[in-house]
Amino acid sequence: MPYATQQNLVDQFGERELIALTDRDSVGVIDPAVLARALADADALIDSYLVARYSLPLSGVYPVLRMIAGDLARYLLSGAGVAEVEVVRARYKDAIRYLESVRDGKTVLGAEATAHTAAGEGARIVATGSDRVFTADTLADFIG
């Protein structure tokens, strides 16, 4: 399930900006294929952070991930023709910092997310080894 859709990005950044970011053929409309590629790349980037902490795919929809996916896709689509490059870059860096915080366990997505059990938490330790070398029978000759 994608974290964001074309409509989510239209709502987040406006249609005019998305046309500027995706319209490679200058036809005056959003190119859905270009936008879908950026959204897929954003999803893959998000998943690369979440997989360290959560079972994927996530079962719930998290609005924060929709916003993060939008910021990442916008950054991936940006180039020299975008006026607010610094703002786009700053939002991208904020998104990455947030994902790092989730990955490192400092931020939790929500109660519905299924987190992996960290090493040692709730784990049972079991030790196994070879058969005993010294028993009463094997030491019978030495005990007297």
Image (spheres, grey):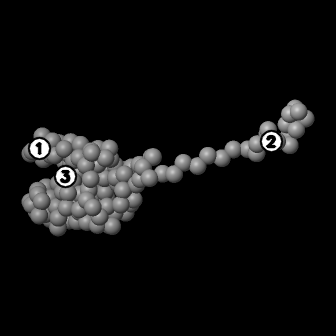
**Picture coordinates of residue 141 (x, y %)?**
90, 35
Pointer 1 local density, CA inside 10 Å: few below 14, some 14–19, many at least 20: few
The residue under the point 23% across, 43% down is 97
Tell which circle, 3 or 2, labels the residue nearer the N-terminal end: 3
- Closer to the camera in the image, 142 or 101: 142
In the image, residue 55 above or below residue 120? below
Disc 1 element: helix
**Picture coordinates of residue 105 (x, y %)?**
31, 47
Question: Mark 3 to mark 1: distance in Å?
Answer: 10 Å
Q: Is residue 123 left or right of residue 73?
A: right
**Picture coordinates of residue 34 (x, y %)?**
26, 59
Question: Mark 1 to mark 2: distance in Å?
Answer: 74 Å
Q: Is residue 136 left or right of residue 92?
A: right
Disc 1 marks which amino acid? Val
Q: Quadrant of residue 94?
A: top left
Q: Is residue 102 left or right of residue 81?
A: right
Disc 3 element: helix
Residue topped by disc 2: 135
Q: Quadrant of residue 37?
A: bottom left
* Residue found at the far front of this picture: 144
Q: Is residue 110 visible?
A: yes
The residue under the point 76% across, 42% down is 132
Residue topped by disc 3: 71
**Picture coordinates of residue 128 (x, y %)?**
66, 47
Tell which circle, 1 or 2, labels the residue nearer the N-terminal end: 1
Give the number of the mark in front: 3 or 2: 2
Disc 2 marks which amino acid? Thr
The residue under the point 37% across, 51% down is 53
Disc 3 marks which amino acid? Asp
- Quadrant of the rendering where the N terminus is positioned: bottom left
